[in-house]
Amino acid sequence: MPEAIRRQARVLSSSLLSTLDLWRGTMLVHAARQPKKRLRLYDLEGDPACRQVREALTALGLDADVFPCPIGGTRYRPKAEALAGAGGFPLLVDANTGDTLTDGPTIIAHLFRTYAEREPPAAYRPGPMAARLAEVGSMLRVGRGVQARPARRPRRRLQLWSFESSPYSRLVRERLTELELAYTLHNVGKEHWTELGPAALRLRPGPYQPRPGGRREQLLARWGRVQLPYLEDPNTGTAMFESADIIVYLEQHYAHEPQL
């Protein structure tokens, strides 16, 4: 099968997953205050409960240092298991409050109560139906973002600008997880309904005008455009848009046996 067709199939399955999740993790619900000490999330990209926590991070615009813990991983998973005990994943360490939390709904409630001073909206309170849909959605991406692969360890954390429901960003996060590459996740949720749609096909015609004072306005001034995902690697000075290019870069630069 040609690579272009395989890539479109990956994007389609990622889009279907976001649809089953009702596109939570798209919009900024409340611009929360950033904590003095960055949140630490021990995460498994392909896990439904972890995804629900990342959706909440996008809804609040909170950044986090993400430590991927794929099955068979040896870099961060043992430490996470020691901290979590039988709690499993996701695991959130909040040095600002002294909390170490393992249950998804508990983590989500902590994030909203601590950094937005409110209860989680109904859409971000995982119930039985949402949990079931999340599990079905994960089946669409079965085998991706779950199993560790041998890779070189960078000296400094990579930097990823993303929002959770972005089908293209998900493909990048899956590779970061498989290769056990820690990264700082900068959440850049959409700030207004007119921003809905891909970067080149937003609902509002004409030049892109982000909401004044928001994170997207800052990024437009910095980059000249707002397109996600965007990756910076301080180890090599590399900075790039386009998920396909980012994946090729990660595979060629870090994977012991690149899968392109």
Image (tube, helix red, strand yellow):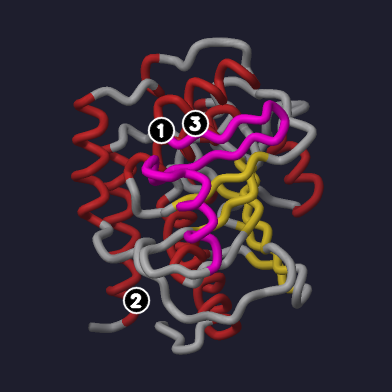
Total marks placed: 3
Q: Residues within 10 Å of mark 2 (few under 14, many from 20)?
A: few
Helix, strand or loop under label 1: helix
Compared to residue 250, the image places residue 201 above or below, namely: above
Q: Which residue is mark 1?
A: 104
Label 1 to label 2, Cα distance in Å?
36 Å
**In this orientation, which residue lies closer to the viewer: 31 or 110?**
110
Residue 147 visible in the current orientation: yes
Type of amino acid at the residue the image marks with label 2: Ala
Q: Looking at the figure, which quarter contains the C terminus?
A: bottom left
Task: Specify whether 20 is left or right of 63.
Answer: left
Compared to residue 112, the image places residue 156 above or below, namely: below
Asked whether disc 2 touches disc 3, contact meaning CB atoms under 8 Å apart, the reply is no
Q: Which residue is mark 2?
A: 4
Quarter-wise, where is residue 231 in the image?
bottom right
Label 2 to label 3, Cα distance in Å?
32 Å
Task: Specify whether 176 is left or right of 165.
Answer: right
Helix, strand or loop under label 3: helix
Label 3 to label 1, Cα distance in Å?
10 Å
Task: Specify whether 28 is left or right of 130.
Answer: right
Residue 1 has which mark? none
Between tags 1 and 2, which lies in front? Answer: 1
Q: Is residue 234 magenta?
A: no
Q: Over which residues does the magenta segment extend?
A: 75-102
Ranked by sequence position, the earlier of labels 2 and 3 is 2
Residue 56 has which mark? 3
**In this orientation, which residue lies closer to the viewer: 208 or 102?**
102
